[in-house]
Amino acid sequence: MAAIRTRPLENLLKFKPKNKEKRKVLYKKLITALVQYERIETTINRCHDLSRVASRMIDLAKEGDEETINSWITEKHLIPKVFGHLLPRYQDQVNGYTKVYKIPPRKRDMAKMGIVEFVGNNLPPLLPSDEELRNLKLQKLQEMSSKEIPHKGTPV
């Protein structure tokens, strides 16, 4: 009997809810949603853990370990997407398959929130490009100068 070389899903997580079974189900649903939509919003701790799990999943796909990926993804029609769509996208990369963004906290309980996404997806970008950011700053400066705020002292 060959030894298993992969770490279980639970060993990749830093944020660990107390109930082991609920934790497994939660992260399996999250990784399934990430594969399906390629961008999801959840708490920041789960985002970082999910990013780690997704990176490990891509590494396992590169090794051809379909059995472990099959156990992590709950919707079986998404497994061909991992091998047919995500794997060719990251074939030349060693790491950096996902990106985590911080967003404002959730209103009802002020939980720190984040967005995790696969790099190189076809979704619209979350952040403006450098040129757009430069144009926005120039517009803001022009608006401030048009208000004629005095440069020295306080108006009396």
Image (spheres, grey):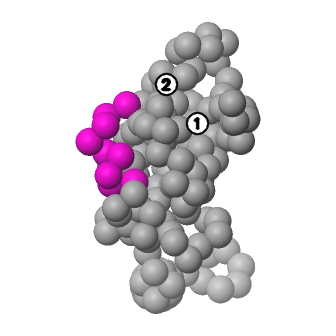
Chain-order first, disc 1 or disc 2: 2
* Identity, as a three-letter code, of the amino acid under mark 1: Arg
Span colored in magenta: 74-82
Q: Position of residue 95 (x, y in %)?
A: 64, 65
- 18 shown above or below 108: above
User: Camera-side residue: 120 or 123?
Assistant: 120
Q: Residue furthest front?
A: 1
Residue 49 falls in which quadrant of the image?
top right
Q: Which residue is mark 2?
A: 26
Describe the element under mark 2 as helix, strand or loop: helix
Q: Is residue 155 visible?
A: yes
Q: Position of residue 151 (x, y in %)?
A: 65, 86
Q: CA distance from mark 1 to mark 2?
A: 10 Å
Q: Look at 66% across and 12% down and name the residue there.
A: 18
- 70 shown above or below 79: above
Give the mark count.
Answer: 2
Q: Is residue 104 visible?
A: no
Task: Name the magenta segment's main secondary structure.
Answer: helix
Quadrant of image for the C terminus? bottom right
User: Camera-side residue: 12 or 142?
Assistant: 12
- 151 shown above or below 80: below
Q: How crowded is the residue under tag 1: few (<14 C-alpha within 10 Å), some, or many (20+)?
A: many
Q: Position of residue 76 (x, y in %)?
A: 31, 37
Quadrant of image for the N terminus? top right
Q: Which residue is mark 1?
A: 46
Task: Find out whether the residues at labels 1 and 2 contact each other: C-beta distance under 8 Å.
Answer: yes
In this image, 121 relative to 66: left or right? Answer: left
